[in-house]
Amino acid sequence: MNALAPGMLLVATAALTDPNFADTVVLLLDVGDDGAVGVVLNRPTGVAVDDVLDGWGSVVAEPVVLFHGGPVGLEGALAVAQVPLTGDAAAGAGLRPISPGLALVDLDQSCEALAGRVTALRIFAGYAGWSAGQLEDEVEQGAWYVVSSRAGDLAREDTSGLARDVLRRQPGELAWVATRPVDPGLN
């Protein structure tokens, strides 16, 4: 199992029955002694980005909708960008690096300031949060698989099969989990 760190993915296991997280893939944005924060990558809403953040729809990846980032802070928005691994794209005003290839975006800046600095962008309403030790306990109890992310995970157009695809690319027996039925009791 991989270590919890910004940029890693959490993939919900069959043991996780909380409807907020069932069959989700969460991108970790911050992990520390005080807890962890992430956003759900595979829960698009029907709300157009421009309906909430005027002008930002022109810079986000398809589909141009807000994503439900998690059950906490639903009145706020977080933006995460994919940035080039080389060069100074993640440096400077408006971007805060998360991990190689990923950065948080300051939504108070103009979206034009991102031109040439990001390769993909997604905006999330709300986030997932864990208190100190909570996520570690959930991983130990088997609620989450912790795996590495890839560049295309953030801005995938069709997110419906993201969890299966992320698991399918894992080494060893973890790849087998990608084919588990929705209700393992029926297997």
Image: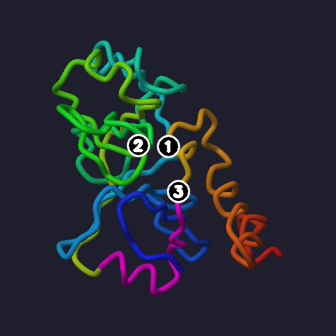
| Farthest-out residue, front | 87
Q: Secondary structure at mark 2?
A: strand
Split into 4 quadrants, where in the image is the C terminus? bottom right
Q: Which mark is residue 120?
A: none
Q: Which residues are magenta?
A: 134-148
Rounded to the nearest angstrom, the CA distance separating label 2 from label 1 is 13 Å
* Badge 2 or badge 1: first in the primary sequence: 2
* Badge 3 or badge 2: first in the primary sequence: 2
| Farthest-out residue, right | 187
Rounded to the nearest angstrom, the CA distance separating label 1 from label 3 is 9 Å
The residue that appears at 50% across and 76% down in the rendered structure is 2
Percent x, y for residue 124? 36, 39
In the image, is residue 142 part of the stretch drawn in magenta? yes
Residue 31 appears left or right of 46: left
Give above or below for 147 relative to 152. below
Percent x, y for residue 24? 53, 57
Question: What residue would you read off at disc 1?
Answer: 154
